[in-house]
Image: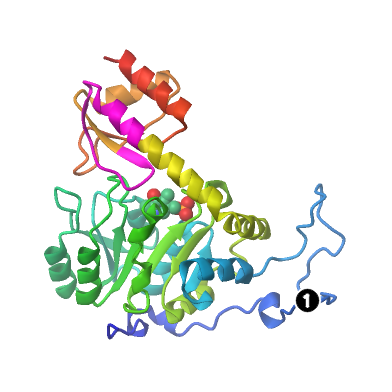
Amino acid sequence: MKNFDFKPLLRKNIQALRPYSSARDEFSAEGSYLFFDANENALGSVGLSEAFNRYPDPYQKQVKTLIAAQQNVDVEQVFLGNGSDEAIDLLFRAFCEPKQDKALIMPPTYGMYSVSASINDVETVKVSLTENYQPDVESVIHTVKNDPSIKLIFLCSPNNPTGNLLNEENIISILENCNAIVVVDEAYIDFSPDQTILRYLNDYPNLVVLQTFSKAWGLANLRLGKAFASTGIISIFNNIKPPYNVNGYTQKAAIQALNAVEQKDNFIKKIIEERENLILELEKLSIVKQVYPSDANFLLVKMTRNATDIYNQLIKDQVVLRNRSTVHLCENCLRITIGTKTENAFLIKQLLRLL
Ligand SMILES: *Cc1c(COP(=O)(O)O)cnc(C)c1O
């Protein structure tokens, strides 16, 4: 196990924080009690037959118990948030002193890391991925060694918008050699489940893994993200999160989803099949220069003609792609989420019309 203590990296105000104690923190138990402690409406919920009048479990114990069993981690190593975006924000609020500490990101990558940094008034240091979209490990290690104000390092695997997994040796090498929190965002890992870095959670106390119900699980609308880390880091997240950050409906739906894993696996299988089909169809088109290999549910595609023109043409046909043509190392590229068989066929038909 790596020798690492996260506490000296915490912001001073978080080290000193006395967390809020909610009604359900001060008393929670199984069984039938009469609750006079949380100023809820005892009569019911306006306009709804289902009852939403009681505050939900602030620590989502039932959901976490199912997740912990499926992922083979301790319940105390799991945090749930209002999307992974909440966990990203909490990382900044826990570890980065505004105007003073920094986060290292590796473009091209997910845009929320730098936006969340800006919101928290934290500077981002950028170390570009290499031409084949892998971390420049030496440069990352060198940069972090020379700047102790870098508290967070963000890696995204499979990476958005490039679609590829980061090599495990690269991630491990960064974990080994950096005295900072290393966040590995695995939003798309369900599409290559064997590749999760989660099995190293107990070896690297500086590792934080993010996953989500928004992609493979098909629950983007419910806003439920997961973070896995040491019990110490998770308890800090619990102390600084809003008390009831995951609503009761979402918790109930997540329990149903976690009890139907076969359906998720079936979705994944179908999406991967469609992805491989779409690659073949796209590669036949003369406006397509290159389809990058993907370990996720989307494709990064480099065009031979102006990508923004193609993007705009498709909008007229009511087909919406993600224009990534101005992104570093993604010049003239579009990002395409895998749709249904029918949707993908329609997309190809519209692209053929542009030839
Ligand atoms: C979609 C996505 C997320 C998920 O965000 P949620 O807030 O959980 O919906 C996280 N990271 C990356 C890289 C993503 O693409």
Q: Which residues are magenta?
A: 276-299
Side (left or right) of 248 relative to 199: right
Q: Does residue 329 appear in this view?
A: yes
Side (left or right) of 166 relative to 41: left
Q: Which residue is mark 1?
A: 37
Quadrant in which residue 345 is drawn:
top left
Instruction: Measuring from the top left, give residue 354's x and y in whole percent.
Output: 30, 15
Confirm if mark 1 falls within 8 A of ligand 1.
no
Instruction: Measuring from the top left, give residue 64's x and y in whole percent.
Output: 56, 69
Badge 1: residue crowd in 10 Å (few <14, some 14–19, many ≥20): few
Vertical order, 227 against 16 (above or below) = above
Instruction: Measuring from the top left, give residue 264's x and y in whole percent.
Output: 52, 50
Quadrant where the N terminus sits is bottom left
Q: Secondary structure at mark 1?
A: loop
Quadrant in which residue 21 is drawn:
bottom right
Residue visible at 37% across and 84% down in the picture? 7
**Residue 294 is covered by the magenta coloring:** yes
Vertical order, 273 against 280 (above or below) = below
Vertical order, 4 against 92 (above or below) = below
**Residue 243 is covered by the magenta coloring:** no
